[in-house]
Amino acid sequence: MYMKYLFLGDAQRNLLGDSGAKWQNLPTLSQSTRECYLSVVNCKVIFNNASVHDSLNVKMKIPSSNYYASDNSYPVVAFLNTIDNKTYTLEHDNEISILTNDNLKSIEIVLEDNNGEVIAIDLDDSMELMIKLDYVDQKEQTDQFILELPKRL
């Protein structure tokens, strides 16, 4: 698989009221929209003041073909944990891979606690993410489909 990385730095983050963060005017990742698996390989949220939450769910407002939730919400792309209730990070490798496309002009992130309550992230707080895009090999998929088609006839 071919892969690319996209860094979302805190300096480019915009607030979405009390509901989260948004990065706009992202670089064009390919000349045409391509199917890929998106995963967060690193994420750090630092609150200016200590919070009362032991963990955070990071939701990303993106289209997905392989994600379903009981509340029909946007995909959870990472689970963050903390030791001091100020700094939240990935505790181990993130195994979540969301099937989407690389037509990402902007990305919206919402933080929630385990009860589904939205956690506000203010200007004094900090958030950054490293996103990995693993592109689907279209030729390999086509070849596999051609091999399996006679079996279905």
Image: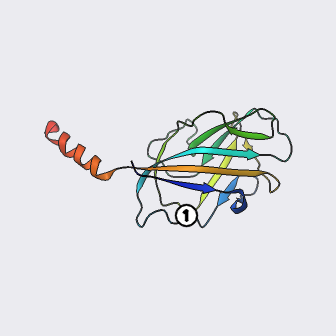
Residue at image coords 55%, 65%: 27
- Report if residue 84 is visible in the image: yes
- Image coordinates of residue 19 in percent, x first then y, are 72, 51
Task: From this view, report whether residue 148 is shown above or below residue 21.
Answer: above
Secondary element type, mark 1: loop
User: In the picture provided, is 55 more to the left or to the right than 5?
Assistant: right
Report the front residue among 97 and 57. 97
- Image coordinates of residue 13 in percent, x first then y, are 70, 59
Residue at image coords 38%, 49%: 136
Q: Which residue is mark 1?
A: 105
- Image coordinates of residue 55 in percent, x first then y, are 71, 34
Residue at image coords 15%, 36%: 151
Report the front residue among 41 and 108. 41
Task: From this view, report whether residue 142 is shown above or below residue 11.
Answer: above
Type of amino acid under label 1: Lys
User: In the picture provided, is 56 more to the left or to the right than 150?
Assistant: right
- Report if residue 19 is visible in the image: no
Residue at image coords 67%, 57%: 9
* Crowd tier of the residue under label 1, counting other residues whose Cα lies within 10 Å: few below 14, some 14–19, many 20 or above: few
Report the front residue among 136 and 115. 136
- Image coordinates of residue 48 in percent, x first then y, are 84, 48
Image quarter hosting the C terminus: top left
